[in-house]
Amino acid sequence: MVDSLTLRLTLGSATVRDRICDYVVVELQSCGYEDITPALLGFLGGLDCGTNYASAIARNLNVSRQRVARMVSELCQAGYLQQDAADGRQKAILFTQEGEELMAEVRRILARLDKAIEKETGRQGLNATVESLERIAAVLEQKL
């Protein structure tokens, strides 16, 4: 069997993403955001800060519009998103004040995690890893 560094990269990057998400969810829950799950956090992370539309969200996250509708409904009920009437058929999807506060807390948690990772890898090591992943993503984008 052929050994593949790309396979190891795929598995390793998925594990890192999952562990970061799990860490952020645990931290958010300890801050009082008990209703946040990894799935909801992943969905919120895929939204723009301004106005969003279901069709664009579905494309960006590679999910169905039905899934977007369910997630938006759940997040509206939780108070993190709101839908406003817009021109045309689509409703604008926006963060509420509470949703913006949630996302600000996520950024604070990630900044603390940066410091913890930097203790192990050094700032240059973390920067080099991020830059390498960005270059790999660019290569893969060209291959599509």
Image (cartoon, grey):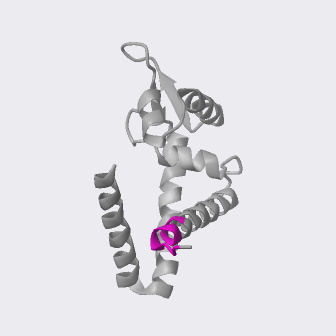
Residue 72 as seen in the image, left or right of residue 60: right
Which quadrant of the figure has residue 92? top left
Q: Nearer the viewer, residue 14 or 78?
A: 14
- 69 on left or right of 139: right
Reply yes or no: does residue 72 show up in magenta. Answer: no
Q: Residue at x 65, y 33 (%)?
A: 74
As drawn, the residue found furthest toward the top would be 88
Query: Residue 12 at what x, y percent from top left?
Result: 54, 70
Vertical order, 54 against 43 (above or below): above
The residue that appears at 56% across and 73% down in the rendered structure is 1
Q: Can you tell which quarter of the image residue 23 is in?
A: bottom right
Of residue 53 and residue 78, the one placed in the foreground of this image is 53
* Image coords of residue 121 (percent x, y): 45, 85
Seen as rendered, the residue at the extreme front is 1
- Quick check: 131 above or below 44? below
Nearer to us in this view, 22 or 105: 22
Q: Position of residue 77 (x, y in %)?
A: 65, 31
Residue 6 magenta: yes
Q: Is residue 79 left or right of residue 116?
A: right
Q: Which residues are magenta?
A: 2-10
Chief secondary structure of the magenta portion: helix
* Residue 6 horizontal/vertical position (percent): 46, 68
Q: Residue at x 67, y 50 (%)?
A: 37
Residue at x 48%, y 42% (from the top left corner): 61
Q: Is residue 138 above or below residue 8?
A: above
Number of marks in the image?
A: 0
